[in-house]
Amino acid sequence: GAACWLPPGATDVSTARLVRHGMARAVPGLGLRGLRRMGPVLQALERGHRDSAPEPHWWLWLLGTEPARTGQGVASANGTPAFLDTQLEANLGFYARHRFEPVVSGEVDGLRWWGLRREPRAPL
């Protein structure tokens, strides 16, 4: 499993930052329609993120698990305040098991998305 957590104070995902970290290599796979959709989709996701998690927090920006390892707890994270987006409704149950709750949703050019938030656990 792999997770890309952006730390408090560094959750801005600008176009320049995406390009700097390899997004340009993904552009050919998006096609013309995908490229046209990307700007409005990223703007909507960022707006939902900013409105739903205005205070310092961790942002689970990317999460992936080897298909053979799903359901084994590989993607579990600690109890810090966190926010994430998903474009797959089927993921909502998975994230709910890890205490993420939908706080914002929208649709841009036919693409449905959800912003989820997890409150920090009480200190032990």
Image (spheres, grey):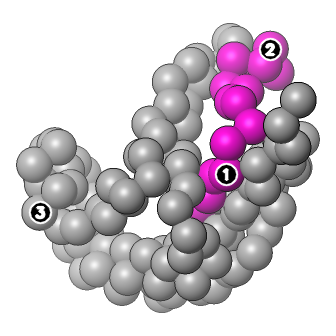
Q: Helix or strand or loop: what does disc 3 sit on?
A: helix
Q: CA distance from mark 1 to mark 2?
A: 23 Å
Q: Which mark is residue 39?
A: none
Residue 52 location, x and y as percent? 63, 77
Three-letter code for the amino acid on which mark 3 is drawn = Ala
- Please state the extent of the stretch shown in magenta in the rendering: 70-85
Q: CA distance from mark 1 to mark 3?
A: 26 Å
Q: CA distance from mark 2 to mark 3?
A: 36 Å
Q: Is residue 29 above or below residue 62?
A: below
Query: Do the CB atoms of the residues marked 2 and 3 lie less than 8 Å apart?
Result: no
Q: Helix or strand or loop: what does disc 2 sit on?
A: loop
Within the image, what quadrant is residue 13 found in?
A: bottom left
Instruction: Name the residue at 64% across, 52% down.
Output: 82
Q: Is residue 100 left or right of residue 65?
A: right
Q: Which mark is residue 81?
A: 1
Magenta stretch: dominant secondary structure: loop
Q: Which mark is residue 72?
A: 2
Which residue is labeled 3 in the image? 16
Residue 18 location, x and y as percent? 20, 55
